[in-house]
Image (cartoon, helix red, strand yellow):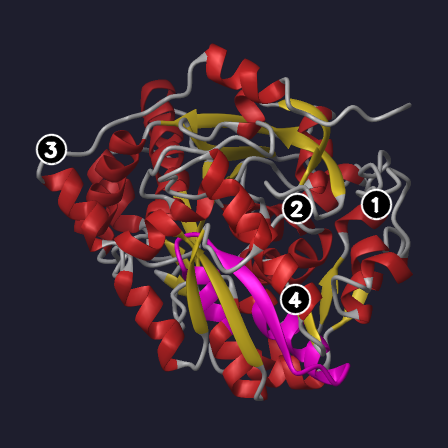
């Protein structure tokens, strides 16, 4: 076993990036503009500021500034858990008997258990800086809600979370962590909001979706004075904040002269994948280097691999701006699989544009194979991964085994963006043989596509 590269590559706090990287500045084909749901015209900063904090609205629409300074207060918060380590998966390589070199960027070394804290503290900071009382949001698996509750507690902001109902029931411990940090949690869809009541009337007994929870959170923010809505993925601003993942990973790899051939991330709304690949994709766009990028999504919610590229609502209640993205339709309700953070009907407009332009590929995998990969990883690498991150692990293993067949010594980088210690209900189902693989039929998807909004040219 080579000892030239350490098991873990650490940066010191002085090496931590001081700016976020705005990938859109280097994109030749920019993502299509967000549309106002009332007028179907490109949304303005003023209109967007009615939903989001003013500074976040500016970041959302900024497609020309390549680097944006990270405020000092956010940098100081980051130092509690950043820089995050880049780990060489020597034990996994040995287990697979592969010539491939496997690295993973670990984002689970904080109480929220995931990368979500990188954007949560940024969004809470800008809300506090604007003088707001609190924020509302949605959460799937609970990682985003946990992260936001931590950030709001740190800054003395109120936090109201709408948690997808199936995750609320499957992941009670994440719910209690949020309550520990002072957040109020409501299972979604609920009877508390007008849109929640409409969804329950149309889909009685539904297990919910991120699209439903977003609608409820937006409605609540609009009714409360001094509140704004914040989102944990999908949006340009969120991918911007998450670029600290990729910037750190690249700096750590450059430190040892390592260049990845393949970069892999799980994909639900796109925050962790976009954050990981951003600086590497920037090099590719500028013609400085080439990489293979792979987005991995659940077969039960396959927006990239089976969705359509079209304008769609970001939420089920059709109250949020419309975004051009790969989508399954905002009315699509995914099955209650155990990767709650990936149960979103659409994909980030940035990643959708990159995928549409052929700069990135996508694969969908079934959850039993994902949990088999997660179990293997846990046994040999010592960290219990979240179901979401395990999608990336599955494809990283697949690629390493391909190298074993061909003898190629490729270097693989993937994102391990969360721990699975609050997902034991899912692991129990897997170990008891009770986990199933649900894949939507073409007929189900076709029916959902027919509900897409008709946008005039």
Q: Is 165 placed above or below 449 here?
A: below
Q: Could you tell which of marks 4 and 1 lies nearer the N-terminus? A: 1
**Residue contact at pointers 3 and 4, CB within 8 angstroms:** no
Read off the residue under disc 2: 280
**On the image, numbered disc 1 is attached to which residue?**
36
Residue 433: image tag: 3
Q: Residue at x 86, y 56 (%)?
A: 62
Q: At which x and y percent is residue 17?
A: 66, 70
Image location (x, y in percent) of residue 428: 14, 47
- Dot label at residue 221: 4
Q: Is residue 136 above or below residue 379?
A: below
Q: Nearer the viewer, residue 156 or 213?
A: 213
Tell me the mark number nearer the camera, choosing from 3 and 2: 3
Q: Is residue 175 magenta?
A: no
Which residue range is magenta in the image?
120-148
Q: Nearer the viewer, mark 3 or mark 4?
A: 4
Disc ID at residue 141? none
Say which label, 3 or 4, has the lower sequence index: 4
Q: CA distance from mark 3 to mark 1?
A: 46 Å
N-term mark: 1 or 2: 1
3D distance between C-alphas at marks 4 and 1: 17 Å
Rendered residue at 71%/48% (across/down)? 320
Nearer to me, 394 or 423: 423
Q: Disc 4 on helix, strand or loop?
A: helix
Spatial distance from mark 3 to mark 4, Cα to Cα? 42 Å
- 126 in relation to 191, above or below: below
Decide which of tag 3 and tag 1 comes sooner along the chain. Answer: 1
Q: Position of residue 445 (x, y in %)?
A: 52, 18
In this rendering, which labeled residue sits more in front, label 2 or label 4? Answer: 4
Q: Is residue 305 left or right of residue 424?
A: right
């Amino acid at each position: 076993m080579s000892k030239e590269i350490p098991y873990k590559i650490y940066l010191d706090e002085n090496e931590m990036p001081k700016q976020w990287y705005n990938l859109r500045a280097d994109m030749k084909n920019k993502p299509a503009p967000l549309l106002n749901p009332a007028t179907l015209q490109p949304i303005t900063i003023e209109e967007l500021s009615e939903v989001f904090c003013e500074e976040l609205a500016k970041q959302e629409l900024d497609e020309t500034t390549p680097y944006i300074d990270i405020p000092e207060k956010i940098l100081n918060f980051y130092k509690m858990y950043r820089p995050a380590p880049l780990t060489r998966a020597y034990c996994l390589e040995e287990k697979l008997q592969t010539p491939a070199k496997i690295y993973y960027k670990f984002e689970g070394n904080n109480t929220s258990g995931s990368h979500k804290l990188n954007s949560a503290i940024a969004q809470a900071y800008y809300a506090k800086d604007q003088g707001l009382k609190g924020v509302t949001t949605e959460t799937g698996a609970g990682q985003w809600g946990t992260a936001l509750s931590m950030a709001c507690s740190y800054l003395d902001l109120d936090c109201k979370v709408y948690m997808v109902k199936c995750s609320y029931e499957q992941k009670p411990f994440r719910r209690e962590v949020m309550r520990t940090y002072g957040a109020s949690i409501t299972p979604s869809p609920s009877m508390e909001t007008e849109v929640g009541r409409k969804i329950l009337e149309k889909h009685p007994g539904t297990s919910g979706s991120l699209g439903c929870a977003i609608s409820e959170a937006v409605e609540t923010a609009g009714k409360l004075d001094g509140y704004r809505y914040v989102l944990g993925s999908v949006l340009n601003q969120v991918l911007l904040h998450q670029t600290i993942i990729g910037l750190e990973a690249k700096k750590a790899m450059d430190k040892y002269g390592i260049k990845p051939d393949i970069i892999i991330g799980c994909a639900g709304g796109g925050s962790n994948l976009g954050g990981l690949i951003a600086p590497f994709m920037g090099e590719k766009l500028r013609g400085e280097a080439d990489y293979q990028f792979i987005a991995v999504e659940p077969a039960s919610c396959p927006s990239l691999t089976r969705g359509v590229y079209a304008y769609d609502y970001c939420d089920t209640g059709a109250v949020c701006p419309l975004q051009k993205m790969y989508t399954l339709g905002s009315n699509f309700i995914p099955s209650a699989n155990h990767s709650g953070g990936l149960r979103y009907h659409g994909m980030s407009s940035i990643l959708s544009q990159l995928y549409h332009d052929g700069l990135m590929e996508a694969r969908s995998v079934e959850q039993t194979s994902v949990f088999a990969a997660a179990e293997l990883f846990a046994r040999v690498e010592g960290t219990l991964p979240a179901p979401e991150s395990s999608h990336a692990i599955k494809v990283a293993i697949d690629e390493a085994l391909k190298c074993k067949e061909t003898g190629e010594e490729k270097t693989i980088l993937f994102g391990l963006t969360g721990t699975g210690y609050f997902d034991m209900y899912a692991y129990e189902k897997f170990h008891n043989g009770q986990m199933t693989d649900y894949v939507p039929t073409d007929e189900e998807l076709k029916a959902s596509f027919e509900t897409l909004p008709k946008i005039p040219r």
